[in-house]
Amino acid sequence: MPTEKPRHELSLLDYWKIIVRRRWIILIFSALVIVTTAIGTARQDKAYLAKTVLHIDTSPPRIVEWDESVDTRPRLIDFQSFYNTQYQIINSYTVKASTIDKLRAKGYTEWDDFDDPVAAFSRNMKVELIKDTRLVEIGYVHKDPEKAAEIANTIAEVYIDENLKRKLETNKFARQFLARQTLGWKEKKRESDLRLHDYYVANDLVMLEENESVFQKRMASLYAEYSSAKAARIKAENEYRTLLDLYEQGNVEYFVGGDTTGSIRTLKDQLNELNRRYAALSERYRSKFPEMMRLERERQAVAQALDDEVSEYIKAKEKDYLVKQSQEAALLEEFDRAKEEAAKIAAKQVEIHALRAESERNARFFKQLDERQTEFDLVGLIRTSPIEVIDRAVKPVRPVRPNLTLNLLLAMLISATGGLGLAFVVEYLDRTFKSPDEIEQYLGIPLLGVFPSVPKGDDEASNRDLYVYRNQKSSVAECSRAIRTNIMLGNAGKKRRTILVTSASPREGKSTLVANLGIAMALANKRTLLADTDLRRPRLHKVFNIDADQGVSTLFEGSSAYEESIRPTEIPNLFILPAGPIPENPSELLGSRQTQDIIRDLEARFDVIIFDSPPCIAVTDAVVLSEHMDGVLLVIKQESTTRDAAQEALRRLSEVSDNLIGCIMNNIDIDHDNYGYRYYYRYYYYQYYGEEQGANRG
């Protein structure tokens, strides 16, 4: 049994088709919304908006120059915070309530009838910060333009007064605070001055500043003398240590250069001469020779004298070193005493500096507070405000409400959106077949063709049931020929001679389709029989204006022969087997044993037999006949047959036989693209190029 397949994803073309198909819903909904909006707008009372423009600076004009120690220019974030604060102040309950009180004094009592007059007043009040400026617009909407201007100006006046009032209150508080602080710091200054004076007297430091420079010079002189003595001592010590080392090494030559009396040099020369003579004699005599022994005694005496002289020289250098060392120690001791005295004085100076700094700080604070108090006293005498009126509100000429243009534009937008939404909702709820593409999608059976809706008219050529015969070059005729071709050639190798045409529900154009399809078969030179097996509501005999006294019912009952029951029509090769008298039990009659024999006899007489049967859901006649057919056609009427009904019809037909060959969609309007480009293109191709060929083929 075919089952409903999942929907494919909708493309833009599918959405467009839905819009075109449901265009009347969209248009009617849009028209209702727009007309309602226009009527409602026209019935609204006019309202006028008056605006007062204020310039709000971040600080009031300066009357005195204050000595600011830091940069007080506001940052960008401070500007934003400031103007947002002013916006909230203007919209505050206090400003609105004060405005109402001021207006009430002028005779405005229109808000007194409300439980919350401020809330009622706020509904028509407009406050807007003008971007990238320091300007603020205060507006009020009222049905009287003069009152709108006066109320807007009153709001601005109350806001300026409230701002000035807060400023004066703040200034008063600041003056009182500064007065208390000034008095306190004045007392602190006096106490610190007394403590500094008492410390000077108690520590005998009255002349400290005058003697401080002399003491500093003395310290510098002592340090210089000590440094010089230390350098001299180091020099003498180095010289003494060097001479002592040379003496211990026996190096006498160094002492000759430092000998001021010449005695060391003389002794050194004598010793050198004796050594020379001794060396000369030693070449001829031995050491025991008297002359050699005499020279040796002289040499030792001179050497001893030289050593004594050098020792005295070293002792003199040692004495000089010790003297300089003593001088250095004395100067160091004196310098240390001076440092101790300086440290004591420095300790007293630290306390003096602390007391003096405290006194100066108290004096500075007292001076600043005294100056600031004087300035606040001056500012308090002058009523200045950072807010000024740039443009006072004037009587507006044009109303702001109702705005017909804006309301209509919004209505158009809402109506278009709502209409589209309603159209898609209706489309979603509509379970009828709307396009041929949905046949295979939801039923899973082939579509053999579409049958257009036949044009209506009063002339004979407009007869719906015989339209193909009367208008053989029309698109309806071409569609019938296409269906005929698909039926005959759809299953290669197997001829379909008996065809049952049924539908899911009544009034789906099944009989009209049978008549025109039979005409298309007959025009193709095929002996065609149209058998009206709808034994409950027969119609084919009316189409061809034939007497229905004998037909299917009498033929099945055996009360009439084939020649009596089958009637020719005005159309060549087309014959009619009417339903005959309506029997009591049509289903039992069609399901009798002679059904197969009768169908076989009819096949021997005709090339094609088309059975027009009743809907297969309402009664079982079509289901009973379907098992004897070569093929069964299910008629689907566009925008009439529901998917549930079609699926139920397929289920019933499939339970009996498997000879369902496909569907035909009926009542298609091919003049509008509501069902798919491929059908639209196909039939217009036939209309322009294939009608003549179709007629020839027919």
Image (cartoon, helix red, strand yellow):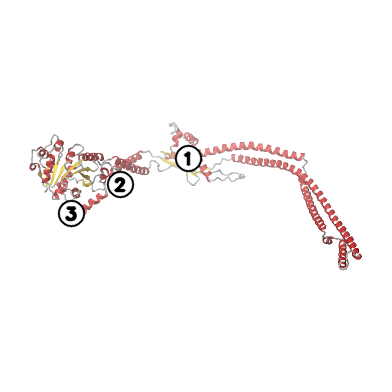
Q: Secondary structure at mark 1?
A: helix
* Horizontal side of residue 491 vs 334, given as left or right: left
Mark 3 or 1, which is nearer the eye?
3
Location of the N terminus by quadrant is top left
Tags 1 and 2 in contact by the CB under 8 Å rule?
no
Under circle 3, the secondary element is: helix
Instruction: Say which mark, if any, is on residue 693.
Output: 3
Cα–Cα gap, marks 3 and 2: 33 Å
Q: Nearer the viewer, residue 533 or 499?
A: 499
Residue 413 point in image, percent of width and height: 35, 44
Q: Which residue is mark 2?
A: 14
Label 3: how many Cα within 10 Å (few below 14, some 14–19, many 20+)? few
The correct choice, above or below, for 272 with respect to 480 in the image is below
In front of the other: 310 or 599: 310
Q: Which residue is mark 1?
A: 153
Q: Amino acid at mark 3?
A: Gln
